[in-house]
Image (cartoon, rainbow, N blue to C red):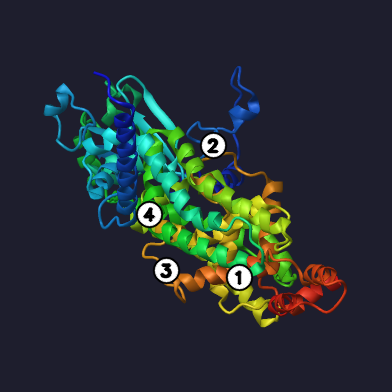
Amino acid sequence: MRRSTSARADDTESRQDSRSDIVSAISEALAHPGDAPGGLDNIFHRSGYSQKDIWSAFESIDDLVVAVAEHEALFISQPLMRRVRPNTLDDVRDTLVAFGLVASREYSTTLVGFVRMMMAEAARNPSLKKRLYEAGSEIVTRRLREFLSEANERGILSISDAQVCAEQLMGLLREPLYQALMLNPVTSQNGTTADRVKAGVERFLHGCASARSVRYERAI
Amino acid sequence: MNAPFDTASAGRSLLARSSDRPLPLKVVDDVPSDLANCADEHGSLVTVEPVDWIICFVPGLKRQWWHRFVHHKHKHVFAMRPTNTGSWLLVEPWWTRMMVTILPPADAVKFLRWGGTGDILRVREQVPGRASQMRGWSNCAVITAFVLGRPSWTWTPHGLYKELLREKTTRRENVEQLLVDQFAKVVSQYSSNALSVSADQLSLPLRELLVIIGRNLLETMMTPALLEVCYTAILEADRYPNATRVYAQHGPKRAIEVLTNILARAKQAGEIDLADCEAGARQFLGMLYGNIHLEAVLQLGAIPTLSEIDLRARTAVKVFLDGAGPDETAILERAVLRNGGGSLPVAGRRAWVYLR
């Protein structure tokens, strides 16, 4: 007997819900690795879902990890999407600080595990690495570039290459990731994460050259 | 200490050969006389000092029928040597061929980890050696003894292991220490080159000095050998945390130290307004990294060209020193135009005050 259209729609919706729940649980497991090794099996185990649940919602490991990358990209770039057209320098600053806080938190938690998993899986499947990067980091950089371009066109910022500037700001915010990946134990720094993000955004917006040195630059 | 591919020691050997003893003038048919005459006392065209090999005695990766007849942890043996660029030379006797290849560090770690499941010895090779090609059946133990120039009569990896262990100069090694030594050597060598600043350069205006350092750093970070080491340091951080720590100490931390000092001098000279120079150094390094470093470490896309590196270094310095915000002239012009040439609106005045 053929199932009704509404029954099929319900199935699709429930599958979408379960995919979304699994992606959130995996992101959470990546954010809190504990002492366990970063292999996929351990991550699945810590997510609380059985392999059977996972494979009924996703066709393959690649499908699952790409969904996690997309989920992260969407989450990090939400502040940029909430205010696509900034009107003032304060708008730009507030948006970049909000974006920076989310990015910085994710770079020191979920994305640490994610990058390690990406590198480990890349040995098995090199093309996956590129797909993950495109679905994650590239999307975030693109949204940031669009935001900076808009601010530039409105005369709020003065940048010659929005892509390079977006990459520079991403690099500045990515420091916790490098710290977590390489500097173990993480080096203690002055101030809270929020202070550091605000200071970073201020540096990005205004630089640190003193009035004296700027006058000197102009004079020469 | 190991000295593989040590050009300095090879150079010393060459000098010693050319100055210490007269070259015999023997001419061999079909060989150019200059080549024939430069052979050393052992008949070799180049004289290379004996070096250390890392000899790995390992259990089998796959079960074989003959495994029951040999030591449980020493069923196979192969030799490795680190190079000055982070890669490793591998000499592994197979049943059907001799595998001689250069491995990037991440792949070398796989072999070293295999070695770690058995025993790893550091052994100095003998030159010219006392082994013989007449030795007969060439299994992995016999070939490895031959590589080392040892006149061994053992047929098994475990037999060779016991023989080598009896030598006074043989030392046991562990994987993490090998990686620590190699990372320290390779990364510090690259860092020193990238971060060395001459007295003349130190007297340049900050902007120019930062462009030079930024360009050198980016160029060095994009060196394939260093990217391979960085990739391995990240990949193996859980398994070999000390090796990763050494990478960070000699690489990024060293760069942050040097940049912090430069910024502190500039702050003292009134060139910059910076409350925390170390935080500033981290921010500048992050801007230099941008996306290109992560992309290069993950081996995504092409490594940037020198002109791209130069452009990125200049842009990073500009944003770091001047910011991406508009300069006050532009703000003033816009505000005055909007206001029909009258006095500035409050927002414009605030921006003016804030910017300067």
Left or right: residue B332 compared with residue A205: right
Label 4's element? helix
Disc 3 and disc 1: Cα gap in Å? 22 Å
Q: Quadrant of the N terminus of chain A?
A: top left
Label 3's element? loop
Disc 2 and disc 4: Cα gap in Å? 54 Å
Disc 2 and disc 3: Cα gap in Å? 48 Å
Check the residue under mark 3 and report the chain it is in: A
What amino acid is found at the position of numbered circle 4 in the picture?
Thr
Disc 4 and disc 3: Cα gap in Å? 19 Å
Q: Closest to the observer: B30 or B120?
A: B120
What amino acid is found at the position of numbered circle 3 in the picture?
Thr
**Disc 1 marks which residue?**
A202
Mark number, residue A187: 3
Label 2's element? loop
Which circle's residue, 4 or 3, is located before the other in the chain?
Answer: 4
Check the residue under mark 2 and report the chain it is in: B
Residue A163 % position (x, y): 64, 50
Residue projecting furthest to the left: B68
Mark number, residue B46: 2
Residue A94 % position (x, y): 56, 67
